[in-house]
Image (spheres, rainbow, N blue to C red):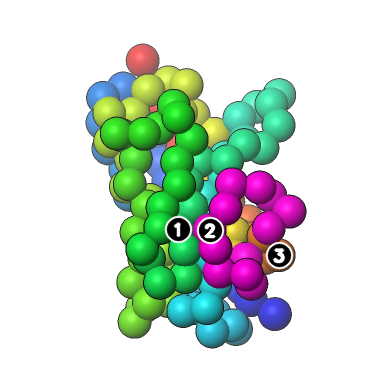
Amino acid sequence: QAKLVESGGGLVQAGGSLRLSCAVSGRAFNSLGMGWFRQAPGKEREFVAAISWEGRRTNYQDSVKGRFTISRDNAKNTVYLQMNSLEPEDTAVYSCAAGPWGTGGHLQVEYEYWGQGTQVTVSS
């Protein structure tokens, strides 16, 4: 069983930046593929970014490419999402997820463990 705890959300103006963190415990972090998903009010949860277990492969939703960067520190059991040039459309609850297959894909079914989420609000 893995426990995931997100942090770093908040309120930011359009064009600003935030860095989200997700600390993982209870499983061998360096075997897990990690992903970030988000859910805006009234919308379904959607894929944002993912990274493979060793950090060599990353995957992004088209709308965040060039603005968001996912990374991981296996020594700290933590995955990060650096978000730059934020837009009001990025407002959502952001959740990290861990998948035992290690690939870091874009499908929610690939992920077994989920965090509670952190709110990101971008004002115009």
Residue 105 is covered by the magenta coloring:
yes
Q: Measured from the top left, where is residue 86 in percent x and y? A: 34, 29
Q: Quadrant of residue 40?
A: top right
Q: Secondary structure at mark 3?
A: loop
Q: Earlier in the sequence, mark 2 or mark 3?
A: 2
Q: Quadrant of residue 39?
A: top right
Q: Residue at x 40, y 58 (%)?
A: 57
Compute the Cα span from label 2 to label 3.
Answer: 12 Å
Which of the numbered marks, if any, corresponds to residue 51? 1
Comparing 86 with 107, the one in front is: 107
Which residue is the site of mark 2? 104
Q: Are marks 3 and 1 in contact (CB under 8 Å)?
A: no
* 107 horizontally vs 54: left or right: right
Residue 50 is covered by the magenta coloring:
no
Which of the numbered marks, if any, corresponds to residue 39? none
Q: Secondary structure at mark 2?
A: loop
Comparing 66 with 103, the one in front is: 103
Query: Which three-letter amino acid code belongs to the residue tagged 3?
Result: Glu
Query: Which three-letter amino acid code belongs to the residue tagged 2?
Result: Gly
Q: Measured from the top left, where is residue 60 in percent x and y? A: 45, 41
User: The magenta stretch spans which residues?
Assistant: 99-110
Which residue is the site of mark 3? 112
Comparing 11 with 47, the one in front is: 47
**Structural crowding at the residue carrying mark 3, measured as other residues with C-alpha within 10 Å and reported as few (<14), some (14–19) or many (≥20):** few
Q: Measured from the top left, where is residue 89 in percent x and y? A: 47, 21
Q: Residue at x 46, y 79 (%)?
A: 30
Q: Residue at x 36, y 15 (%)?
A: 124
Residue 53, compared with residue 94, is above or below; it is below
Residue 34 makes an appearance in the image: no
**Structural crowding at the residue carrying mark 1, measured as other residues with C-alpha within 10 Å and reported as few (<14), some (14–19) or many (≥20):** many
* 90 horizontally vs 114: left or right: left
